Amino acid sequence: MCKKRKINSLTILNKTRGYGASRSKLKNGFYALIFAGLMAAGLAAAFFFAAPQPLAASINSLAGFSSDVNDYTFEFYDADNGLVNPYITALTGDGKGALYVGTWSGVMKFDGSIFSKIEGAGGRVEGVAPQYISALYYDTPSETLWIGSMFNKNAGLFKYRGGHFTRYSAIDGLPSDNISSICASGGKIYAGTWGGGVAVFDQNRFETLSKKNGLSDNYISSLAYSEKTSSLWAGSKFSGANLIKDGKITVMDDHTSTLVNNYVHRIVIDEAQNTVYFGTSGGVSKFNGAAWQNIITGPDALCNNFIKDIHISNSKSYDKAVLYFMSAGDLSISCDNAFYNINIKKLSGRDLELNAVYADDNYIYLATDRGLCKIGRR
């Protein structure tokens, strides 16, 4: 069972005191004298505290997830709270507490209570598409926010670093200006496009992987990179998933594998378990490199098969990864194969269309068509 990590120092201290008390009652004066000498020399403390505590002793509370909406707090942010546009399409965090929010009117930064517009030098939104942000990715090593945009005259791939925007488009070598997903590894930026395949940005040059190279589809819906296996996964609109490794492309769909559905909306990777998760229009598939397993609606499983987004949290607060499977109106939280399903309408009291999910150590964030949901655990 997924548990929250917490060192129970009081329990260890009480055990030590109990041990010492039992020894102090020894009737044999010789042993009592030896024990007193050890204590005076500080060796007894070393003896008792040097022994490592078993893992079970270091974990003393459950993760705190539940299917009861009364066990959660809920806050809602919209235009009245400073959102430039309440229609939110993408979310990502910087790992330091800030949340980046992609809307139809640009990108905003959220510190937990206040929104601020992401702008270029001099307050100008230098070339960033004002109408539709489709993908966000924060590259921690370079402290760079990468932004994808679709279906407008200023669409393309954008780099935001040091208060400055740089826009890349077909003129720079992108196979399509419509960017659907972004990931990165080793200084390379991978951009999934809607109609042009996968663009690989390296040393200020673009290379393209498309159907001509063996991709199942040029309409890419999701990208994920595995550092452990040096592999790129690309999900497609109608033709399953593609494994790109060592220059070879392997197509995995409902014919060549047991992928539950060929429309792959989101791919995430649990590196610790060497498992890839595919959120599709027909449920979730998981692949460990050798075997497939499908997860669909049912008791103690998903509450909806149409999975629009998945977020994986590898927080040090928990002993295992926590997965958030989001449909259009529901959220399924899974840890160690246990599922907790939350009906967002019941929790929020609103009819909301969910578009993206992100979670940190404290809150779950949902991007919707009417604003930002912030969910906490009581």
Image (cartoon, rainbow, N blue to C red):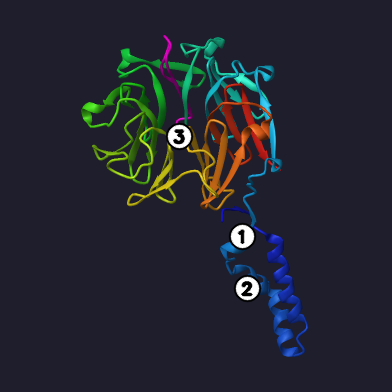
**Residue at mark 3:** 141
Of discs 1 and 2, which sits in the foreground? 1
Q: Earlier in the sequence, mark 2 or mark 3?
A: 2
* Tag 1: amino acid: Ser
Q: CA distance from mark 1 to mark 2?
A: 19 Å
Q: Nearer the viewer, residue 104 or 13?
A: 104
Which mark, by number, is residue 58? 1
Of discs 1 and 3, which sits in the foreground? 1
Q: Earlier in the sequence, mark 1 or mark 2?
A: 2
* Tag 3: amino acid: Pro
Residue at 34% x, 51% y is 291
Q: Residue furthest left?
A: 212
**Other residues around mark 3 within 10 Å, as few (<14) / some (14–19) / many (≥20):** few
Q: CA distance from mark 2 to mark 3?
A: 42 Å
Query: Callout 3: helix, strand or loop?
Result: loop
Q: Residues in magenta?
A: 140-158
Which mark, by number, is residue 260? none
* Tag 2: amino acid: Phe
Quarter holding residue 344: top right
Callout 1 touching callout 3 (CB < 8 Å): no
Q: Nearer the viewer, residue 47 or 371?
A: 371
Position of 41 compared to 288: left or right?
A: right
Residue 11: x, y in percent? 70, 64
**Residue at mark 2:** 47
Residue 311 visible (yes or no):
yes
Q: Earlier in the sequence, mark 1 or mark 3?
A: 1
